[in-house]
Image (spheres, grey):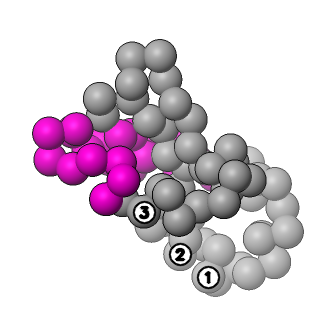
Amino acid sequence: MAIHYRCRHCKTHVGTIDHHSVNASSLGFEALNAEERQELLSYKENGDIDVTTTCEDCQDTLERYPEFHTLKSFIQ
């Protein structure tokens, strides 16, 4: 099992955590409510977990242009 992080905005692969170095429960996924889990986590048949996050570049853009938070996607 691996945990893969991908940016929700630009779809850039942010990183991967191998199951040998950490387990999913230590990452705080259990603190998410059902709606957040559905929105942010995707469980694959092979046991991998895809996590939707925001990369540093997109976060910087959102901080400079807070009105972009209202858009579903600000990447053209």
Q: Which residue is labeled 2 in the image?
A: 60
Q: Are marks 2 and 1 in contact (CB under 8 Å)?
A: yes
Q: How far is the residue under mark 3 from the one under mark 2?
A: 24 Å
Instruction: Find the residue positioned furthest to the left.
Output: 20
Q: How far is the residue under mark 2 from the one under mark 1?
A: 5 Å
Q: Label 1 amino acid?
A: Glu
Q: Label 2 amino acid?
A: Asp
Q: Earlier in the sequence, mark 3 or mark 2?
A: 3
- Nearer to the camera, 13 or 37: 37
Crowding at label 3, few (<14), some or many (≥20) Cα neighbours within 10 Å?
A: few
For the point 64% across and 83% down, the residue is 64
Which x, y percent locates residue 34? 69, 52
Q: Label 3 amino acid?
A: Gly
Q: Secondary structure at mark 1?
A: helix
Residue 25, relative to residue 28: is it above or below?
above
Q: Which residue is labeled 1 in the image?
A: 63
Q: Secondary structure at mark 2?
A: helix
Tell me if 54 is positioned left or right of 39 in this view: left
Which x, y percent locates residue 23? 27, 47
Which x, y percent locates residue 15? 32, 47
Residue 66, relative to residue 49: is it above or below?
below
Q: Quadrant of residue 62?
A: bottom right
Q: Quadrant of residue 68?
A: bottom right
User: Can residue 75 be seen here?
Assistant: no
Numbered badge on residue 28: 3
Q: Is residue 12 magenta?
A: yes
Q: How far is the residue under mark 3 from the one under mark 1?
A: 25 Å
